[in-house]
């Protein structure tokens, strides 16, 4: 995504995927990630910051920041004189369940190495995605991601509502549907489901209640459900 | 003309709906009260903002599980005689959102529905047809005997239990006194 620059602002943020991470020669006022990163590392010591590439046709990369430094990184993105990302338009969540991948590893004695396939378990985690724009500098979007360590009890992330006020309701929605616990959120309650609801419906392993008894033309999963229901009804009658 | 006919003529031509809308069907409901369709021709122009003054509940749209207790409570607060039109596929069965975890699969699980009006959404003509069908139903009701309306029967229930929002679903999932799962009309085979 090329940033639509305002020449009066003096600086532009280069988000073009083809030039991302390299120094652009087309315009001296365009800033790349290479120029932003050192500034960020000085401002926030110890921050882990990486670019997540995007293989989709839009090829819009996103910035992944570690959760310990997420709040200070968000303040940096908002207050930096070049970036000035003063507007958070969208907050959403992604559930990444645990998965197994196959990795090819070279094993054996030196000289007689063999390529062996090993299966590895990638632990699951929850991810929160923030879409940021700059109203002042007229550029964006910047996609910011923060990840939890896991999907079980360790699902807390710092709330970015102190940085962007518009996050408040949307972080409540992510808490409701994905179960991410936002620390220091001013009002962390469920938004769409009722108080007392115990699950997080947008998680991949959510099982919805079996609450429809009748389907005129069942097929696939619904057919299996209908057959199970019919069997139960015949057994009870 | 008998007293019965005069009584029912008056009732059927002053059916005042409760003023509330749930989803896109409500837009069609609003359109049917405007000048082009003019539901006032049938004596139903006065949408009442209070359940105490309303005779008809038009359930116009998707009923989410979060909304069910409020709808049943509003129905309970309406004075007898009262009627219900389930407007649109969602209010009848959940419609296109039937497989959703948050959608009630038909409001007739908790309150008695007099007219089921299909459509997604039904056109204003269809809503007027539903209203005319309801008027015909009211006009045909005898005031004595077995077929008399619910509000003239001493044992007739006027209030229905409000479901509780549980940890996973509404509890109970339906009111078994007024709704049972329909029988599947043909054997389910793979």
Image: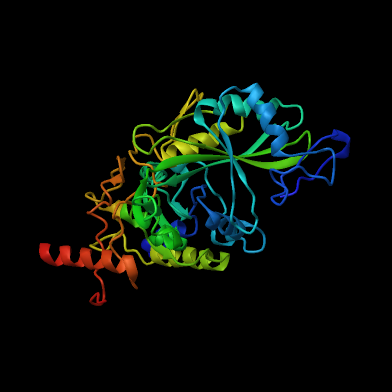
Q: Quadrant of the N terminus of chain B?
A: bottom left
Q: What percent of the width, then of the height, locates residue B92?
A: 40, 61
Q: What percent of the width, then of the height, locates residue A168?
A: 55, 31
Can residue B81 be seen here? The reply is no
Q: What percent of the width, then of the height, locates residue A84?
A: 73, 31
**Which residue is located at x 31 percent, y 44 percent?**
B168
Can residue A91 be seen here? The reply is yes
In-front residue for pair A30/B63:
A30
Q: Residue furthest front?
A: A111
**Which residue is located at x 52 percent, y 53 percent?**
B23
In-front residue for pair B96/A221:
A221
In-front residue for pair B169/A59:
A59
Q: How many marks?
A: 0
Q: Image height check: is B161 above or below A55?
A: above
Q: Image height check: is A30 above or below B61?
A: above
Q: In the image, is A89 to the left or to the right of A16?
A: left
Q: Image height check: is A140 above or below A101?
A: above
Q: In the image, is B144 to the left or to the right of A55?
A: left
Q: What percent of the width, then of the height, locates residue B80?
A: 36, 48
In-front residue for pair B5/B86:
B86
């Amino acid at each position: 995504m090329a940033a639509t620059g305002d020449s009066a602002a003096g600086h532009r943020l280069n988000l073009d995927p083809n030039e991302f991470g390299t120094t652009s020669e087309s315009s001296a006022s365009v800033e790349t990630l290479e120029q932003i990163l050192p500034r960020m590392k000085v401002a926030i010591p110890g921050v882990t910051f990486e670019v997540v590439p995007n293989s989709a046709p839009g090829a819009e990369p996103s910035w992944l920041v570690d959760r310990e430094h997420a709040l200070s990184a968000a303040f940096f993105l908002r207050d930096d004189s070049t970036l000035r990302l003063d507007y958070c338009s969208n907050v959403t969540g992604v559930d990444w369940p645990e998965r197994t991948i196959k990795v090819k590893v070279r094993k054996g004695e030196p000289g007689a190495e063999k390529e062996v396939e090993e299966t590895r378990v990638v632990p699951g985690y929850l991810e929160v995605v923030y879409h940021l724009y700059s109203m002042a500098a007229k550029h964006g979007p910047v996609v910011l991601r923060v990840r939890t360590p896991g999907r079980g009890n360790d699902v807390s992330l710092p709330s970015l509502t102190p940085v962007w006020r518009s996050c408040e309701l949307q972080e409540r929605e992510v808490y409701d549907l994905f179960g991410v616990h936002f620390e220091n959120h001013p009002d962390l309650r469920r938004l769409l489901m009722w108080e007392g609801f115990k699950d997080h419906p947008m998680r991949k392993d959510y099982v919805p209640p079996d609450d429809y008894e009748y389907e005129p033309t069942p097929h696939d999963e619904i057919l299996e459900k209908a057959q199970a229901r019919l069997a139960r009804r015949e057994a009870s009658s | 003309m008998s007293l019965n006919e005069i009584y029912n003529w008056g009732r059927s031509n002053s059916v005042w709906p409760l003023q509330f809308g749930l989803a896109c069907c409500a837009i069609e409901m609003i359109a049917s009260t405007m000048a082009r369709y003019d539901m006032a021709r049938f004596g139903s122009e006065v949408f009442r903002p209070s359940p105490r003054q309303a005779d008809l509940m038009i359930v116009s749209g998707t009923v989410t599980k979060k909304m069910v207790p409020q709808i049943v409570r509003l129905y309970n607060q309406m004075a007898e005689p009262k009627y219900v039109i389930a407007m649109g596929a969602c209010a009848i069965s959940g419609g296109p959102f039937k497989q959703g975890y948050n959608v009630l699969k038909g409001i007739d699980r908790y309150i008695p529905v007099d007219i089921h009006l299909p459509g997604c959404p039904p056109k204003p003509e269809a809503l007027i047809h539903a209203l005319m069908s309801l008027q015909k139903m009211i006009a045909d009701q005898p005031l004595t005997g077995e077929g008399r309306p619910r509000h003239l029967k001493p044992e007739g229930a006027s209030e229905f239990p409000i479901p509780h929002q549980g940890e996973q679903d509404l509890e109970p999932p339906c009111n078994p006194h007024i709704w049972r799962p329909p029988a599947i009309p043909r054997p389910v085979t793979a």
